[in-house]
Image (cartoon, rainbow, N blue to C red):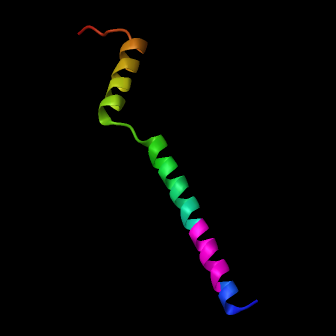
Amino acid sequence: MSHFDNLYRDVTCAAAAVLITLAISLSFVQSTSAAPFHVAAAYQQAHQAGMPAQHA
């Protein structure tokens, strides 16, 4: 193999690794992100539905 073939293979593998890493990272960020309003609303709704009202 020539030097050019080795360099081409290394660059191709590096580019593929970067693309795979970006795809996984963006997928993780998208799946774990939520707007603060949606998180607060879901929390409030869960507590109102599952817990009886407490009177002081």
Front residue (pair 39, 16) = 16
24, above or below 39, in the image: below
Q: Position of residue 52 (x, y in %)?
A: 37, 9
On screen, residue 12 versus residue 49, left or right, reads right
- Quarter in which the N terminus is drawn: bottom right
Give the overall secondary structure of the magenta segment: helix
Left or right: 2 as drawn, with respect to 31: right
Question: Which residue sits at x=72%, y=91%?
Answer: 2
Q: Say if the magenta span includes residue 37.
A: no
Rendered residue at 53%/54% (across/down): 23
Nearer to me, 20 or 6: 6
Badge count = 0
At horizontal 67% and vertical 92% (from top left) the residue drawn is: 3
Q: Quadrant of residue 4?
A: bottom right
| Residue 15 sits inside the magenta stretch | yes
Vertical arrangement, residue 18 with respect to residue 44, above or below: below
Percent x, y of residue 29 = 45, 48
Q: Residue 17, position in %: x, y?
A: 59, 66
Looking at the image, residue 30 lies above or below residue 37: below
Residue 33 position by quadrant? top left
Give the extent of the magenta segment: 7-16
What residue sits 31% from the left and 35% below the top? 36
Task: Choose between 47 and 34: the one closer to the eye.
Answer: 34
Residue 16 is left or right of residue 56, and the answer is right
The x, y position of residue 26, in whole percent, is 48, 51
